[in-house]
Image (spheres, coloured by chain):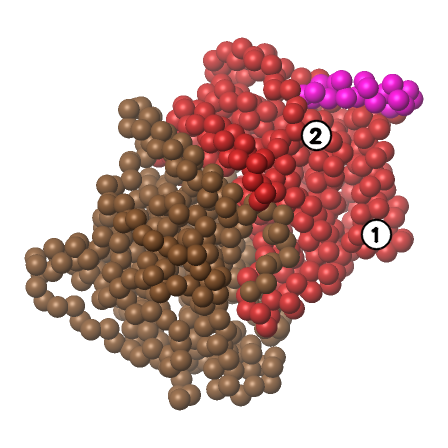
Chain colours: A red, B brown
Amino acid sequence: MPAPELSPPQSSLPAAASRSGAYVLAEAAARARDIKGATGARPLAPPLPAPPPVDIPAVEVRTPSVDLERILRGPSGLGTASLRLARREERPTPPAPAEGNPIPGLYYHPVPEPDPVRVEEVSRRIKAWAGDEVDLYPEDWEDQFDGFSVGRYMVACHPDAPTVDHLMLATRLMVAENAVDDCYCEDHGGSPIGLGERLLLAHTALDPLYTTEEYQPRWAESLHSDAPRRAYRSAMEYFLQEASPSQADRFRHDMARLHMGYLAEAAWAQTDQVPEVWEYLAMRQFNNFRPCPTITDTVGGYELPADLHAQPAMQRVIALAGNATTIVNDLYSYTKELAAPGRHLNLPVVIAEREGLSDRDAYLKAVEVHNDLMHDFEAEAAAVADACPVPSVQRFLRGVAVWVDGNHYWHQTNTFRYSLPDFW
Amino acid sequence: MPAPELSPPQSSLPAAASRSGAYVLAEAAARARDIKGATGARPLAPPLPAPPPVDIPAVEVRTPSVDLERILRGPSGLGTASLRLARREERPTPPAPAEGNPIPGLYYHPVPEPDPVRVEEVSRRIKAWAGDEVDLYPEDWEDQFDGFSVGRYMVACHPDAPTVDHLMLATRLMVAENAVDDCYCEDHGGSPIGLGERLLLAHTALDPLYTTEEYQPRWAESLHSDAPRRAYRSAMEYFLQEASPSQADRFRHDMARLHMGYLAEAAWAQTDQVPEVWEYLAMRQFNNFRPCPTITDTVGGYELPADLHAQPAMQRVIALAGNATTIVNDLYSYTKELAAPGRHLNLPVVIAEREGLSDRDAYLKAVEVHNDLMHDFEAEAAAVADACPVPSVQRFLRGVAVWVDGNHYWHQTNTFRYSLPDFW
């Protein structure tokens, strides 16, 4: 992919690598002080073993080496094989095999079945949270909540989470994000009319209002006034117990992007307009899974330093990963969206309309777009891993790649929600 | 102001202070490497004198000491008095006195007249940029562009900018932000219909799209297709030459907030709805000047480290400063907005409508809301300055405070745009 027009003057990767050591030291020093000080509220990163030293050869940007691919997404997540084995001894029933077929021709990586003990525990806890803590949905939505299989989803995407508590951070946020999308934008009473107001007021549950004593309490009360806001508020409160301020800032930024994406999509829905393909892809870079893989370090109990996260090369990797995972959603939800009332934009629909292709050819072209994004993601991630051999960077890149694979796994196996079109 | 509900678990200020020293060291080490390395594209911070060591007494949160007030906004910006004197020798004509009256009862701080040599040079260069580089406006908008007096505005807000080149970073972005607001949202053809699409596509000039080889060029071309996008693209390109990746990320985040704020306001315009006062204040925390004061360090040629910027206490200071400056805009533009077609929401209008007050009483109450926000900003900034005696933190806080004062100065003196109501 050509370098984007805006970023050439920024620091290059070797500079990032040379800075990172100092930052790691600074962080370690600060954490050491945190342990002693009464004010250090953040727990230490859990004592996971550091990733083994690996020999990462110099690679061509578009050709990740076999070694690096293995590092980025070996069949087992870091440290999870032993966890899983230990738990399987306690509970010897083998996991149910994954159902559903992958899309023919789709470039993806299979993942091991997610640890069934963790899946069960996360599923139990998330249902209790949704019911008891945030009163998320009326009883007749329970089937749909169960069919979402969010426990299996999050365990598959975060195999290196040190504890179930860490998995719950991701799981609550994922459920809250879906509640906002469903209730404000889509299936359950959503509408493009007034969406800008609803999303902004919900966003203040993540990025708080600071105002005068007279008006502050009314805002605080508003966060309890509907299910999406209750879910955002509570999920964020838990997240802030583990995330550093910079990790929280990163998450807020990604959520602002998501909400902007919803609003662009709503603008097209309101005017019944089909955008050009590149415009759709631009919207989809914002209305995107990005807030999910980018918390992989918080869920993993470590931190990618803010200055390394902000590097243009890392931003490119994150954007490409998010775009690939999001087109996976377009492809697997294609028949579901066709069956829903109204026209629902997704990449095959937009390609068919704007490029005059048959539904089948447009779908197959969308598969190719996805595959190109995946290859670009892997090539760029390999280049970053090569240029910046810092443990938090290596682990973050691996975490994002595992998230991408877990996301595909969930879409493939979620036959309650998704089925494939008959194009082959 | 009560602590916002979401932030108690985050790190406290003393922890921030203890970390900062290590970060400053890390940054210095990284910059030292940048000088030697061929890849270090960022120039060093210009050799401004460090702020003198000051004795900052412990202060009550709501009662900043006189000393600290002086530090936060003395009558002369850091290092600018000597600059100004030197330039005045070259050009002995005294600056024109500020026109316009301040709002009676408004809590504000006067600023010295901005350096007329700088004002003239910035005004000349920004007009050349708008005309020759980004083809910003048709000829008959020239009066309006001149009446905006953006050179005087930015010189007043950034007295510590080491060079006119630094001032131009802020000036281009300010003009671009106004072009987007005018052309997409307000006076010059703006509309709530389709706004979500327009803002998102313009946002990609700040936060680039990463997509496939087939579609990437069409996106790159789109950035030249209208004045707002040309302005964003070019202003950001210049900004990236000076900003660190973390400073660029901070700016993108603040611009995403701004665009969300526009979209919430547009939602109310479309449904002709007057929000509750707290809802309006929440929207106005996003549709806000925030992206302008938060680049004060880039414009000043230094960097507030990302981890200190993200601290909850610093986020609160920034939000309060942004909210105070934004209500200043509501108050000074009140008669202009009343005279414009349609109902334009601003704080006095919303208070009058929702609280059943007369126009005059609602306006005076809005002045009190502003004053409370200003006092809270100063108290919280004093607390941060006290808890975190790190040069970049002290200078950033002073830079934000000076921006707040310069913003008031510009509103007060811009009689081309603004006049006061007859309420006293």
Q: Secondary structure at mark 1?
A: helix
Between the C-alphas of marks 1 and 2, the distance is 25 Å
- Whether residue A37 is situated above or below residue A387 in the rendered picture: below
Residue designated by label 2: A161
Q: Chain ID for label 2?
A: A
Q: Quadrant of the C terminus of chain A?
A: top right
Q: Chain ID for label 1?
A: A
Q: Amino acid at mark 1?
A: Asp
Along the viewing direction, whichever of B80 and A313 lies nearer the viewer = B80
Q: In the image, is B305 to the left or to the right of A379?
A: left
Residue designated by label 1: A132
In this rendering, does residue B404 appear at all?
no
Residue located 45% across and 80% down the image: B338
Mark 2 neighbour density, 10 Å: few (under 14) some (14–19) many (20 or more) = many
State which region is magenta.
Answer: A76-95
In this rendering, does residue B339 appear at all?
yes
Residue located 48% across and 86% down the image: B360
Q: Is residue A82 magenta?
A: yes
Q: Amino acid at mark 2?
A: Ala
Along the viewing direction, whichever of B72 and B186 lies nearer the viewer = B72
Query: Quadrant of the rendered structure where residue B138 is?
Result: bottom left
N-term-proximal mark, 1 vs 2: 1
- Counting from the top left corner in percent of width and height, residue A76 is at 71, 18
- Counting from the top left corner in percent of width and height, residue B78 is at 26, 54
- Whether residue A158 is situated above or below residue B159 in the rendered picture: above
Residue located 76% across and 26% down the image: A102
Residue located 55% across and 62% down the image: A210
Residue extending furthest toward the right: A93
Q: Secondary structure at mark 2?
A: loop
- Counting from the top left corner in percent of width and height, residue B152 is at 26, 63
Q: Is residue B273 magenta?
A: no
